[in-house]
Every structure is written in C-alpha cells, then in structure tokens.
Amino acid sequence: MDTGVESGPVALRVSPLTHLEERMRAATVTGARGVELTEWQCLTMLNLRVDPESEAADRIGKALGAPLPRRCGDTTTSGLHTALWLGPDEWLVLSHREAATVAAESREALAQAPGSVVDVSANRTTLELTGPAAREVLEKGCPLDLHPRAFAPGQAVSTTVGPVPVLLWQVDDAPTYRLFPRASFADYLARWLLDAMTEYGADEVA
C-alpha cells in the first residue's frame, strides 16, 4: 500500500535549502505588501517522454488522472498529480505520492511504446513564492510578462529569475508561484529572492 512516505535511502535525502529554512521564515512580510518564500522539500518529480498522439500517452494520462497538457505553458492537475508541459513530447510530472510508485504506474502505462519515465526528484527543488508582492519580486529579475493578461494561474513555462534557469508555475491568483531550479542553483536563487523581498518589509515611501 502506498502511504506517501518515502523509505530506504530516499528517506535520508536532505533538501538543498534546509540551511536556509530559518532565514526564509524570518524574511516573511505580512500585510498589503506581504510576500513569503518557502521550500517544498523532496517533492516527487518524473520526467516523462512519449508521443502525445499515441495510445500510450492516453494510458499515462488515465494513470495520472488527467490528460497530458498539449500546449506550451499548459498544466493539468488531478488529485495528487500535476503535469507541466516542457516540450512537444516531454512533461514534468509532480506528485505527492512516493516516486517509485508513480514511476512504476507510469511505466506500466507506457508499456512497450517508445518513450521514457525517469525519476528526477533529486534534480530540482521547489520554491514557493506567495503574497500580494510576489509578482513584483519576480519582476525584478524575470523577463516574462507576468501581468495577469499574459500569465495566469495554471500556466508554467521555462524562464530565468535573476541568472538562474527555472520552470515557473503560477498556482493561483494570490498570486502564488512555484519555481523549480536545479538543485545546484537553489541556494543562489533562494538568496536572490530573499534579497529582492527585503524592501517590502520596510515602510512604503509615499
């Protein structure tokens, strides 16, 4: 039975941002200019490749509970799983279930069709930036047009924040964003975001 609790060597994995937990917590700003940065530690992530027009893609979609997104920027969510479009035949699957279980179910759905299912959970980490000032913080170093007319909840695209390549997903209109940097860039990105948040903790200049 899948309990959602990792076991064995995976349970010993340490987040690349554990050492910044207290600093992120202390940097939280409340109120009308509020913004908060947190890390979602050790989230299950699978890299999935398959022909989107194939029966295998349909089977994987059914296994995940929702069809794989077909267009750049699209995401699909069902229960504990979310699939983010990375390319014409590539997706990042996020899950709150154990990686081995989700990977096994996806590989079973793929069967003998051309494609791959790879556990990349240790490749990236997940940063969540939320609050009324979250978009302004990102706009300091993200080249995307993040205005709601151009980027809305449910969209996810590859971009940069500061000098760091990330996959950026807007979750809701709070706004809440989730950023997926490579683990080796996580410390730099977190510190960059913390620095960008600093001004919102001070009184606004009239």
Image (tube, rainbow, N blue to C red):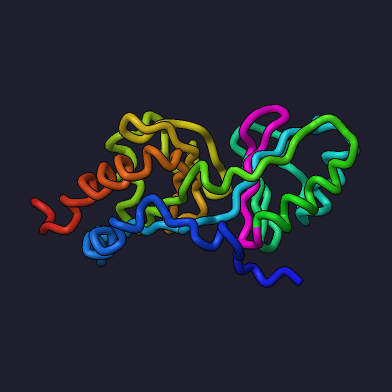
Quarter that holds the N terminus: bottom right
Q: Is residue 130 visible?
A: yes
Q: Position of residue 72 (x, y in %)?
A: 62, 32
Q: Position of residue 197 (x, y in %)?
A: 23, 50
Q: Residue at x 46, y 58 (%)?
A: 40
Q: Is residue 114 left or right of residue 91?
A: right
Q: Residue at x 52, y 46 (%)?
A: 122
Name the one closer to the observer, 108 or 93.
108
Q: Main secondary structure of the magenta part?
A: strand
Q: Residue at x 64, y 68 (%)?
A: 4
Name the one closer to the observer, 149 or 173.
173
Whether residue 92 appears in magenta in the rendering, the answer is yes
Whether residue 45 appears in magenta in the rendering, the answer is no
73 above or below 100?
Answer: above
Q: Residue at x 9, y 51 (%)?
A: 205
165 above or below 96?
Answer: above
Q: Is residue 167 left or right of residue 162?
A: right
Report the magenta residues as a range: 85-98
Name the one closer to the observer, 89 or 137.
89
Q: Residue furthest front?
A: 9
Q: Quadrant of residue 143?
A: top left
Q: Quadrant of residue 77?
A: bottom right
Q: Is residue 75 visible?
A: no
Q: Position of residue 24 (x, y in %)?
A: 28, 59
Q: Position of residue 73 (x, y in %)?
A: 59, 36
> How many marks on residues?
0
